[in-house]
Amino acid sequence: MQTLKYLAGYPEHVRERVRTLLAEDRIAPMLRERYGASHAIRTDRQLYEYVVAMKERHLRQAVPLHKVVYDRRLQVMQHALGLHTSVSRVQGHRLKASREIRIDAVFIDAPADFLRMIVVHELAHLREPDHTRAFYQLCSHIEPDYHRLEFDLRLYLTLRDLPRDA
């Protein structure tokens, strides 16, 4: 029986349905049909411009971002797909804060909708630091299909972790 680590928070009947769909090899075609090809955002500069444009469209009053990058070590080190950090340092008699968003490099080749979902998630952390009801309401406000995209992303990551001969 597969553990389905990306779906651990879901009820057992949902995980059992996913196991059935995996056994019938129906998830990959469904995801390909629903999401299609990858996006064109390949470099850190393009990612920064994409995230800042989305931030300006939906969260104009939020704090500015100083850095947005793809991070190839993120999932291994932090067990996360995206990371929003605020680094404070003393500069003279002032405290200067620098805010960064790091997105796992798995999203370089992922469908555009999955990249958008993780960007929405990290941008929502600019306003709501914790995963509260208000946080998820903000995510759904920015991206109305947020919850479906999050679930489908979990399916996508589950497929990626399967052995190639499976």
Image (spheres, rainbow, N blue to C red):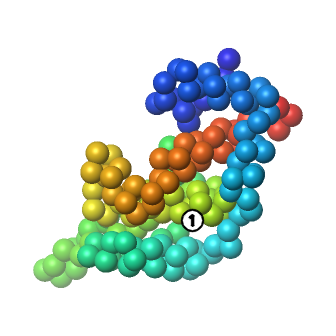
Label 1 element class: strand
In the displayed structure image, the side of residue 30 where residue 128 appears, left or right: left
Residue 41 appears anywhere in the view: yes
Q: Residues within 10 Å of mark 1 (few under 14, many from 20)?
A: many
Which amino acid type is shown beneath numbered disc 1?
Tyr
- Quarter holding residue 46: bottom right
Residue that mark 1 sits on: 70
* Image location of residue 117, percent across then percent down: 51, 58
* Image location of residue 126, percent across then percent down: 31, 64
Residue 76 appears anywhere in the view: no
In the displayed structure image, the side of residue 164 where residue 34 appears, left or right: left
In the displayed structure image, the side of residue 119 where residue 32 appears, left or right: right
Q: Residue at x 40, y 68 (%)?
A: 100
Q: Quadrant of the N terminus?
A: top right
Q: Residue at x 27, y 51 (%)?
A: 134
Q: Residue at x 33, y 46 (%)?
A: 131
Q: Quadrant of the C terminus?
A: top right
